[in-house]
Amino acid sequence: MFEDLLEFAVDYAGRLGAEYAEARFQRDLTESIILKNGFPEISARRVSKGIGVRVLVRGSLGFSSTSNLTRESIRKIVRAAVSIAKASSKLGGKISMSEEKPSKASVEVKPRIRFDAVDVDAKIDFLKEIDGCAVETCERFGVKLPSRLFEVNRWDLEKHLITSDGANVYHKIPRVMAEYLITAHSPQHGTIQRFEEFGESRGWEAIEAWKLPEKLEHEAEAISKVLLKGVEPPKDVVDVVAGSEIVGLACHESAGHPGEADRVLGREAAQGGESYIEPKLLGTRIGSEVVTVVDDPTLKNSFGYYLYDDEGVEARERKL
């Protein structure tokens, strides 16, 4: 889709003096179905698409994008990207690209049950079933759930990348998500909240596989018991066995984000913060020798699944 515009963008950038150029088409379709305190909220469906162009000129990068998918609009953004790169080159600090094997591939994840194959009423009934399981379970313990939010989401991603060094990669990946936030209350014991998110690169079959009615029944029972019978943890230093949610959070925040190149190089300080990792630490072990943290986007059905990155380089497991 729009491959001719991508090829035109890369070719035009080269004619304007770009040492490297890439053009990327992306289309995102998102949809949310929400149930709040047992009542459906206004559901939303949104489609956004556009083409972005990045160029390397005189050792500096420039970027521009448009949602107007015409040849004239592509000319404008290519000229803008080249102009930005030329202006940036006056600041010094030349950029060079690594030597990578350009990939040519088409990756499509086909869902067994498309999200839109299940009608809206059925989705709302599904959320009502989950809501009912949570409420009924808490009531058995004399606990109320005054605030409940349940949501199922869809994100269909379509992306096509063409680069001047020969990469041509197409991805089409459907993703589904579910999340809930429940607040339990007891007049004698106060309140407690539980929040959880789920996500996979599949279709509606993933939501069915999560068995959310049974999951919420278990979670509602757990938070009711914690609210009614929970005891204060010890104040001394103790050994603990961390569950998967805590381990995942620690890996994500303490190893994942700090290892992002934008943060390591100080280019995201205003938006996302800086990092304790510095470029000079490349190859240095961080943390315990008995712990290995990896980032692997090639895991089938994982929420962050992809087989080629946004520069056309084949994905792989990376030890952080």
Image (cartoon, rainbow, N blue to C red):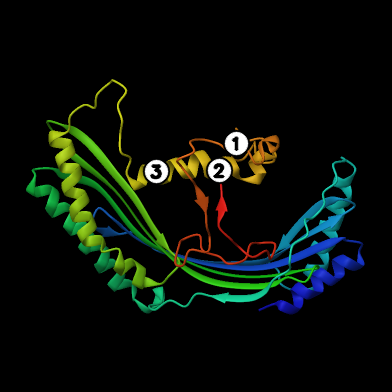
Q: Amino acid at mark 2?
A: His
> Residue 273: which numbered mark, if any?
1
Against 260, residue 204 (above or below) is below
Name the residue tied to disc 2: 257
- Measured from the top left, where is residue 228 in percent x and y? 13, 36
Tag 1: amino acid: Gly
List x then y, in percent, for residue 112: 39, 79
Q: Is residue 113 above or below residue 60?
A: below
3 vs 1, front mark: 3
Residue at (59, 43) in percent of width and height: 259
**Marks 2 and 3, how far apart in space?**
15 Å
Q: Earlier in the sequence, mark 3 or mark 1?
A: 3
Q: Earlier in the sequence, mark 2 or mark 3?
A: 3
* Residue 17 badge: none
Q: Between marks 3 and 1, how big is the CA–CA gap?
A: 22 Å
Disc 1 is placed on an element classified as loop
Please name whichever residue, 123 or 292, is drawn nearer the observer in this view of the structure: 292
Circles 3 and 1: CB distance less than 8 Å? no
Q: Which of the 4 image quadrants contains residue 34? A: bottom left
Q: Residue at x 55, y 36 (%)?
A: 286
In-front residue for pair 23/307 = 307
Q: Residues within 10 Å of mark 2 (few under 14, many from 20)?
A: some
Residue under label 3: 247
Which one is nearer the viewer's eye here, 292 or 12? 292
Confirm or deny contact between disc 2 and disc 1 (CB under 8 A). Answer: yes
Question: From the image, which quarter does the N terminus lie in?
Answer: bottom right
Say which residue appears at 34% left-offset and 76% top-offset: 118
- Kind of residue at badge 3: Val
